[in-house]
Image (tube, helix red, strand yellow):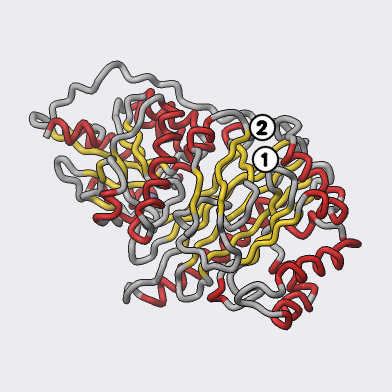
Amino acid sequence: MRTHLLFPSLLLLGSLSLTAACSSGASGTPDPAPAGALPGSTSGTAPVMTVDPSKIKGLRIVNDSSENTSCPFAAGYPDVTGAEAMTAAMKKDVDGRLATFRSACDDGGGAGDVGELNISHQFLVASGDVLGVRLTTQDHSAAGSGLSVRTYWYDGRAGAYRTALGLVDDGSRDAFVSALKKRLKGREGTDADTVDEAFADPSNQTTILDDMVYTADGGLRVTFDRGDVGAPAAGTYVVTFPRATVTPWLSAFGKRAQQQTVRPSGPLDLGAAATPTPAVPTHTASGDDDTDCEKVKCVALTFDDGPAVPETATLLTHLAQYDARATFFTVGQNVAAHPGLVRAEARAGNEVGNHSWSHPDLTKLTSEQVAYQLNRTSAAIKAATGKEPTLFRPPYGAVNSTVRGATKLSPVLWTLDTEDWKYPDAAKVAQSVIGKVQRNDVVLMHDIHATSVAAVPEILRTLGARGYHFVTVSHLRATM
Ligand code: ZN
């Protein structure tokens, strides 16, 4: 049984923090349920460092997700100004996986469980001219292969995207590969022939050597996805080389990436033209909301999956213009990237709720994993707003007794689903609310979609004229 040491509070301190440390993880054991596990929690001994994304200038998280149990997917990957070539590589990978998954949903036609696709991210290095990102994909669809993890690197000095194998010097690749093979042979679940075969084709080397990260002490940890170098049932394999062993094999970029991991030189600077920091609305609520929902018609608009740049700021401006309040069910990895937007949500009198760290189906996780997903997000919200959330919305509306038992937060579902993620059409989204809304409805929308945000002024104008008041979920609950 693996144990994870969690230090969520450290996430909020400084630019570097220890997020994951694993012990007793025997390589080759199947990974239990990594969607809810710690990013970077594959077996190993030395911890992997991660970076506080709020310190990265010009960062935007690209999000796509559904809230639908018949096709549950959620993907979030970073787009950093100056590292466009790396973003393009991530986009290609993510879009390909999403397309395969969505077509499987269409083929399934709602005929049962199509599984779940979840893509989350983690910053490994973001300082000087080095950026390193790790994408973790959990694909439980028929076409998927379970867990797959890939690291992406950007070399700001050369202005080039680097794959994980780019950390190793071309002239040292053979020595590196034979050392890896030596470490893998004899492990449970694989044998010499399987390992030799996996590395025989040089183009396959790029495919299987796609996850390499530096440990806090400068060692290099190489993780092989399930089935890459052994029987799929044997799970992932991890090989960690100590710093002294791996350093002679590294490319010039690999050495800089190692150095920036062990001793970051300062803020990330990829030499891109300075991007202006996106404006955050400064509207401040004038006191508590005194709307009496017993006397007047109320509706609670809820916006999931953000905050997102630039959509959330636009939405806040719309809400302030109509003196409306809403509830934001935020995703922790996006809160960490954009705490200023979450602070602006709260400051304007809106409610900030918890929508998990990386948007997995919580009913597929263990109690500990559910607690991790929710606690880490609540800590990020508290760091941004000064206040712990009291509500959570389970991704896909999926909740069971294990989930309820793992948290003190109160679950919030919805009574009116706009299905805005499915129909990127502002007029249609507006009509889906205006045409169906009833008093005291809790309306589900997403502020990661520009079309959903664009629908809001018409909703506020039309329903406002009909006598509706826009309140937070907690306000609606308290006064009903
Ligand atoms: Zn969601």
Q: Residue furthest right?
A: 171
Q: Residue furthest bottom?
A: 193
Residue drawn 63% across and 76% down?
230
- Sequence-first disc among 1 and 2: 1
- Residue 454 visible in the shown view: no
Residue 351 % position (x, y): 32, 32
Tally of numbered tags? 2
The image shows residue 201 at horizontal and vertical percentages of 78, 77
Residue named by callout 1 = 81
Q: Position of residue 298 (x, y in %)?
A: 17, 35
Image height check: is 271 above or below 204?
A: above
Q: Secondary structure at mark 2?
A: loop
Q: Is residue 206 left or right of residue 460?
A: right
Q: Position of residue 462 (x, y in %)?
A: 25, 38
Mark 1 and ligand 1: say if the CB distance to the nearest ligand atom is below 8 Å.
no
Tag 1: residue type? Thr
Residue 410 showing in the rendered view: yes
- 297 relative to 147, above or below: above
At 62% from the left and 44% from the top, the residue drawn is 123
Q: Which residue is mark 2?
A: 275
